Image (tube, rainbow, N blue to C red):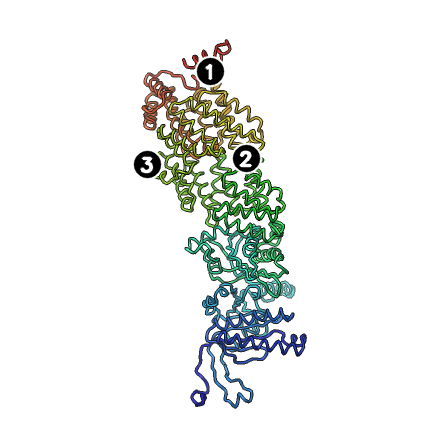
Amino acid sequence: MNEMTHRPSIDSPQLRTLLLTDLCDSTALVESIGDVATATLFRDHDRLVLDLQQRWRGRLIDRSDGLLLMFERPIDGLGFALDYVRTLEVMSASLGKEIKARAGLHVGEVLTWRNTDEAVLAGAKPLEVEGLAKPTAARLMSMARPGQILLSAVAEPLAHRAARELGERGQQLLWKSHGRWRFKGMPESQQVYEVGEPGIAPLRAPPNTPKAWRDIPLWRRPASLVAEAAVLVLFGIGTWFMTRPAPAIAFNQRDWVVVADLRNLTGQTVLDDSLEQAFRISLEQSRYVNVLSDLKARDALARMQLKPGAVMDRAIASEVALRDGARAVILPTVAEVGGRVRVSAEVIDPHTQTTVYAESIDGVGVQSALTSIDEVTASLREKLGEAIASIDQDSAPLPAVTTSNLDALRAYALGQKAMQRQDYPQALEMYGKATELDPKFALAWLGQMRVKNGQVKAPEAVEMLRKAQAARDHLAPREAMYLDAWVARFDTPGKALDKWQQLARLYPDYKPAQSNTAIWLYEDNRFQEALPYAQSAAVKQYELASTGYDMAGRAYLGIGQYRLSAQAFDQAISLGAASSLRRRVIVEAAQRNFDAAMKLEQGLSPKDQHAYLERTTIAVDRADWVAARKLSRDGLALVQKDDGLDSRNFLLPVAVSQWLSGDQASARSNTAKAAQKALGSLMKDFDADARDDAELALASARLSQRLGNRDVAAGVLASLKAHPTLMAMPGLSEMAAVVRAQDLLMAGQPKDAVALLKPLITGHERYQTLVALQEAYAAAGDLESALEVARQLQNRRGLAYIELNCGHCLQALNVADSNLALLQEAEVLSRMGLGPEAEKALANFDRLWPVEVLPAYLSERRSRIKTASRLGTVWESPARSMARMLSRAARIASLGASSSTLQSAKGSD
């Protein structure tokens, strides 16, 4: 039975997807290629349309130069349009002529009816489609640029949500809003969207036409003309406002962006990692745009409970941006279009995941990609608001600041990824491969330097640094300054801090500069100055934010802010900084919360050699000499096999433990050995640890003096005169002055010692400077000043624990002195005739270090003070006693006395 007899002439309204397409400049194309080629072309075109109809379940309603198709679902219509536009690109390449189509997609109600057989035979279409949806789709199609697919506000969300049905291709689609438009004959303005594939979609706003124009809000229209003299000015201003694209994203200077994974559609694997790395390097040259590091982004993926290798596409990168406070996502793509390599990038609003800006550059061959990336990133930086002059100033061509060898660039990118995993051997191998392919690839040499530095292999790190230094011209300005700061650390350490501060000021969001500046200020005890730099590095956008929190914790501890210090260290630990636990332990110990400290200490690894420094110091603090000696020896045993800096530094905690337990002979021996090893290392042609070795030599000299030996100090000071540049560093020159002042004190010249020490009190003086000054004041008879400094020493236990001198080599001595300061206070009070107060100070000292555990020399000293405080007699201070003893020894030596007589004279005092 004939179907038409059972159907109404017009069907009820139905919701359908309409797609209209049009071949651009088809008449000119026909004239240029001739009739025969045209016939072949259109035959291939018709086959294409039929194939796509079947693939996407579409129904062809009408055709001429263009097509009208109807679909059940928007995603089917979009799939047809995408395949159609892409295949025309391929046909263009084979024909050697550009063939492009424009397309409009809309979803709305339509009325359909079938024509009679007679009408169809007479030339009518089998199915007619009418309704407002049809002219809407037609308006979208007519306003589109060649190669552009435009969607209505109804079609876009439906298609966007279903894009995952297109598989991986759907993830790579570019979506962009072009704002609101007015269509002739339609009362309401319409939101217009564009969708397309990277390298194909124009991603540009359609031009205004008589039938479709941009709906400009009233406040953006030109003001009315009020005077003929202002006509041209007002017209120019109005035209500028009307034609200037509205800012689609609120981006400010120093805002952050997330760079999504580069989509490589060329099939050439050499571009997979190399161009993504190149894109980052190019964008990181900006001082206007901050780029979230790949390591930080991967950390966000872990927090999102995604697999480590998850692709950072539009959706995932947007989520990362929202989590880490980034303002925009940049999605780079490389594709091969018509035999040319196209590099494109979109700026995406992470809140809506829509494309707000896009740029693309075509080049010939894969080698053109680096130049194209430079052009694309420069254009994006301008659109984000960076001044053109700044872009020109802070941009160097990628081949000039990296390498023109894509294989070398890929090896470097793989090295970076291995470094992020802390896979140092793999990172070193990849960086080495990069420099093997291009010996002038300075960034890869710097990568090898970072690996060696992370492995605490300073001499090898310096070797790599020299290679990078030789290729400095192949670095961007920021990286060149980074290199200069590292070079200063080894060549002119006195200038290193200035180098890091310059870099931090020029690039305030370059967190390695902020972090390193904080470290150098911390090493000089300039804790208040270090705090802003440390806090700047402690931001969620920085992949090593834990180092910023750790450095802030050190600075707070140095100024006695225990609560803030604990909070900072806790934050660092939560971000994975395991070594911060050592410092979290000493926050409690500095407050004498030993139970809490010991509980935290249980979390320290027995294999962590540096943790033995804190363990030894806490044992000293608690007067547990047996534990202190064992822990210090165990720590030394762990580091001795490497024969590095630690094998020298760890000798001093051993010596302090021996001294306090009464074994002064062993203490003198190890102190002299530490000084000898440090000076021996400084005598090498190049000592990568020169500053630390000089600090260790001076620290050994200081402890030797405390043990009654002036010879070691004299030898150290004489040897260090050969290093004037090194000794000009503030910390070293201060410690040298302390050693000279102690020598004056031992020679019976306390006032000269005070005169030498007082100028060193700057607010960031060394702890041992205060110890020496207190003793000098007491010996000089300035008892009020001596009392004041003794109490300072008791109150600045945070400084005693955290001061860095030679890798905390003086930590145990400092903390011991914080307790001995109570004994010093009792001595001074006794000399001031304040017996009850002196006995109270002695009682406090006894609670810290009970009399039964004191070594003989400390027990005797305590007894003399106690006796003097009770009887009100004047006792002789240790410094005065030492000066008298040395003076007597010198007189005996001048009379030709034997060494045994001298020893007897020493022993009799």
Horizontal and vertical percent for residue 58?
49, 76
Label 3 near label 2: C-beta < 8 Å?
A: no
Q: Secondary structure at mark 2?
A: loop
* Disc 3 from disc 1: Cα separation: 44 Å
From where the camera sits, is residue 705 visible? yes
Q: Looking at the rendered structure, which numbered label has been put on residue 595?
A: 3
Horizontal and vertical percent for residue 867?
33, 17
Q: Secondary structure at mark 3?
A: helix
Q: Quadrant of the C terminus?
A: top left
User: 10 Å neighbourhood of mark 3: few (<14), some, or many (≥20)?
Assistant: few
- Disc 3 residue type? Asp
Q: Which residue is mark 1?
A: 886
* Disc 2 from disc 3: Cα separation: 40 Å
- Disc 2 residue type? Ala
- From the viewer's perspective, is residue 456 above or below residue 443? above
Q: Nearer the viewer, mark 1 or mark 2?
A: 2
Horizontal and vertical percent for residue 199?
57, 64
Q: Is 31 displayed left or right of 16 in the figure?
A: right
Q: Looking at the rendered structure, which numbered label has been put on residue 873?
A: none
* Disc 1 from disc 2: Cα separation: 38 Å
Ranked by sequence position, the earlier of labels 3 and 1 is: 3
- From the viewer's perspective, is residue 140 above or below residue 587? below
Q: Residue furthest top?
A: 895
Q: 50 or 838: which is nearer to us?
A: 50
User: 10 Å neighbourhood of mark 1: few (<14), some, or many (≥20)?
Assistant: many
Q: Which residue is mark 2?
A: 688
Q: 670 or 125: which is nearer to us?
A: 670
Label 2 near label 1: C-beta < 8 Å?
A: no
- Disc 1 residue type? Leu
User: 10 Å neighbourhood of mark 2: few (<14), some, or many (≥20)?
Assistant: many
Horizontal and vertical percent for residue 686?
57, 33
Ranked by sequence position, the earlier of labels 2 and 3 is: 3
